[in-house]
């Protein structure tokens, strides 16, 4: 198709594609839930069958599940294609703004985006020449803004249309064997690309059957950066159900091994017995913690949000990591990633999601016309306590994962590039510092350090933000600290200059929340509760964070 025509873009209504994408996802969710219930009923029904009848029943159930998975993958492909078309809403809005501006001032805009200025002929030749030069220059400026938008619209329309046609065709086809390229991955003679951009290109070229085959080969395929957000959510929800079932079965097996210990009866009487008990208790605690993390993720995915809010599971694993997006980052104009600090286990991801919801609301108030997405990134081993937060090991180990995740957001985004912000609270800001310094660089337009104990560098120029010259970092790096927050006061002795200090040269903004109102504490300058008040309603810092996410200069 190439460049879209102006009249096409002016009549497009991408919001209809967004609504259709959401409806397809809802249908897929209902269908997947129904098939899961059918699968459990079949398992119960054939549990006692023996011989040929049992084998035939099991095979039939497996074939039905494979067919269901195939349909589910095809539906997700359709939803992705519709979501990509929906991402044109920002392009359409900008084209309409240019059209209205040109029309109101007498400019003619051709279908291919060529802009012609009105002619000046007042009879005063010198003055006409001056005015004509001004409007000709404005015509060139309008044209320079318009043509890239028409190119982006044409490319997106063509790509989304092709994906939609292929996905719809896949619905009518029975699942087939994997292609040669995917077969090589399954056989171990080839590997999936590690680079998110390369993986995204590969994934988008695969039919639903190949995507399903990769999921069967690697049930955690949805955790890979570079897969579209809707595909990640689809496969990760399937994997989460499986992981919860496996952890529940593991707890059951542990209880069956020692039913008396499970009831706190018959303690050991020998040293060897006590050692065995401690090992059994440790194994039970580990599985309990894993299951509690999975349950926390499931609860957040099922929790009721604000009207129209979409929750996507972008990642989770058996090591206590999880990532939840509020709204689809692939189609949002503004995308933010929230990185939590010390004392943030997966079981407490609800706290992070609540803070992300506050940030999302603030960003939407800052720019109601643009879709925003805020991601809760529990993707690293956060220090469990202050002692563990004294060193930078966990920040250094978590930095590569954060870098790769942000690269993935760039690779999968549809339409014109989004404005990406990474916000770190407490030790989370230290992780961001590690991800944007040394040999690392962060694919972000802005970073925000909130209640930071330090970010392992002493000046903003030492941070590396992809595409931003180091000398301009001060306009893209923001920092805030409640005056009563003790963490920035003492953390700087461990992790470098406090980002709100003048010598660090970040753009500093004000935050202040409610403090403890007790007579014994009124004379103290510090309040431990201030460390978690940055997202409370009425805190001016929350408003500023929303403005930064929306790409506005803080007021």
Image: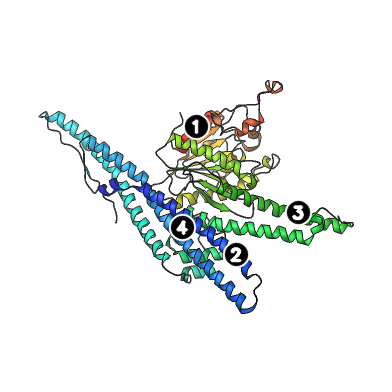
Residue 240 image offset from top left, x and y in percent = 59, 56
Numbered tag placed on residue 76 in the rendering: 4
Kindly give the residue lying farthest to the left in the view shown: 123
Q: Is residue 81 visible?
A: yes
Q: Is residue 475 visible?
A: no
Residue holding disc 1: 543
Closer to the camera, 217 or 450?
217
Q: Is residue 319 above or below residue 362?
A: below
For this view, does 121 lie left or right of residue 306?
left
Residue 352 image offset from top left, x and y in percent = 58, 42
- Mark 3–mark 1 distance (CA, rounded to whole Å): 45 Å
Q: Earlier in the sequence, mark 4 or mark 1?
A: 4
Residue 256 image offset from top left, x and y in percent = 76, 61
Numbered tag placed on residue 282 in the rendering: 3
Whether the residues at callouts 3 and 2 have beta carbons within 8 Å, the answer is no
Whether the residues at callouts 3 and 1 have beta carbons within 8 Å, the answer is no
Crowd class of label 4 (few under 14; some 14 to 19; many from 20; radius 10 Å):
many
**Quarter occupied by residue 519:** top right
Residue 287 image offset from top left, x and y in percent = 70, 55
Residue holding disc 2: 41
Marks 4, 2: nearer the viewer? 2
Q: Earlier in the sequence, mark 4 or mark 3?
A: 4
Q: Earlier in the sequence, mark 3 or mark 1?
A: 3
Closer to the camera, 55 or 393?
55
Whether the residues at callouts 4 and 2 have beta carbons within 8 Å, the answer is no
Closer to the camera, 177 or 39?
39
């Amino acid at each position: 198709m190439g460049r879209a025509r102006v009249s096409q873009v002016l009549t497009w209504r991408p919001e209809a594609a967004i609504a259709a994408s959401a409806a397809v996802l809802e249908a897929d969710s209902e269908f997947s839930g129904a098939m899961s219930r059918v699968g459990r009923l079949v398992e119960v029904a054939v549990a006692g069958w023996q011989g040929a009848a049992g084998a035939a029943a099991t095979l039939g159930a497996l074939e039905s599940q494979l067919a269901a998975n195939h349909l589910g993958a095809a539906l997700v492909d359709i939803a992705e294609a519709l979501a990509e078309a929906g991402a044109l809403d920002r392009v359409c809005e900008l084209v309409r703004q240019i059209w209205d501006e040109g029309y109101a001032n007498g400019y003619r805009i051709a279908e291919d985006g060529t802009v012609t200025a009105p002619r000046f002929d007042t009879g005063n030749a010198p003055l006409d020449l001056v005015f004509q030069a001004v409007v000709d220059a404005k015509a060139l400026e309008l044209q320079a803004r318009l043509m890239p938008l028409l190119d982006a619209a044409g490319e997106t329309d063509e790509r989304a249309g092709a994906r939609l046609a292929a996905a719809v065709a896949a619905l009518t086809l029975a699942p087939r064997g994997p292609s040669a390229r995917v077969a090589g991955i399954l056989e171990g003679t080839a590997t999936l690309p590690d680079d998110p951009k390369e993986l995204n290109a590969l994934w988008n070229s695969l039919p639903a059957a190949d995507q399903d085959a990769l999921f069967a080969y690697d049930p955690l395929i949805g955790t890979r950066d570079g897969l579209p957000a809707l595909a990640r959510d689809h496969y990760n929800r399937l994997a989460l159900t499986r992981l919860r079932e496996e952890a529940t079965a593991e707890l059951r097996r542990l209880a069956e091994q020692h039913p008396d210990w499970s009831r706190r009866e018959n303690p050991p009487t020998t040293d060897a017995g006590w050692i065995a008990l401690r090992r059994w208790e440790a194994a039970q605690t580990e599985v309990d913690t894993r299951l509690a993390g999975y349950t926390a993720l499931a609860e957040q995915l099922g929790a009721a949000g604000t009207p129209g809010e979409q929750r996507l599971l972008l990642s989770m694993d058996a090591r206590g990591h999880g990532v939840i997006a509020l709204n689809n980052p692939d189609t949002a104009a503004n995308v933010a990633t929230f990185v939590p600090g010390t004392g943030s286990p997966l079981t407490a991801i609800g706290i992070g999601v609540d803070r992300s919801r506050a940030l999302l609301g603030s960003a939407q108030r800052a720019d109601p016309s643009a879709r925003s997405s805020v991601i809760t990134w529990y993707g690293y081993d956060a220090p469990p306590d202050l002692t563990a937060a004294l060193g930078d090991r966990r920040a250094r180990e978590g930095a590569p994962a954060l870098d790769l995740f942000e690269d993935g957001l760039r690779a999968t985004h549809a339409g014109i590039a989004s404005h990406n912000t990474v916000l770190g609270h407490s030790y989370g800001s230290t992780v961001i510092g590690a991800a944007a310094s040394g040999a690392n660089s962060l694919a972000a337009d802005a970073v925000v350090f909130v209640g930071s104990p330090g970010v392992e560098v002493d000046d903003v120029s030492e941070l590396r933000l992809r595409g931003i010259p180091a000398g301009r970092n001060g306009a893209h790096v923001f920092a805030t600290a409640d005056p009563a927050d003790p963490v920035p006061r003492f953390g700087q002795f461990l992790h470098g200059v406090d980002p709100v200090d003048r010598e660090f040269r970040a753009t500093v903004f004000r935050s202040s929340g409610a403090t403890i109102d007790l007579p014994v504490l009124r004379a103290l300058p510090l309040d431990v509760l201030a460390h978690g008040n940055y997202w409370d309603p009425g805190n001016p810092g929350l408003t500023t964070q929303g403005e930064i996410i929306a790409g506005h200069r803080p007021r």
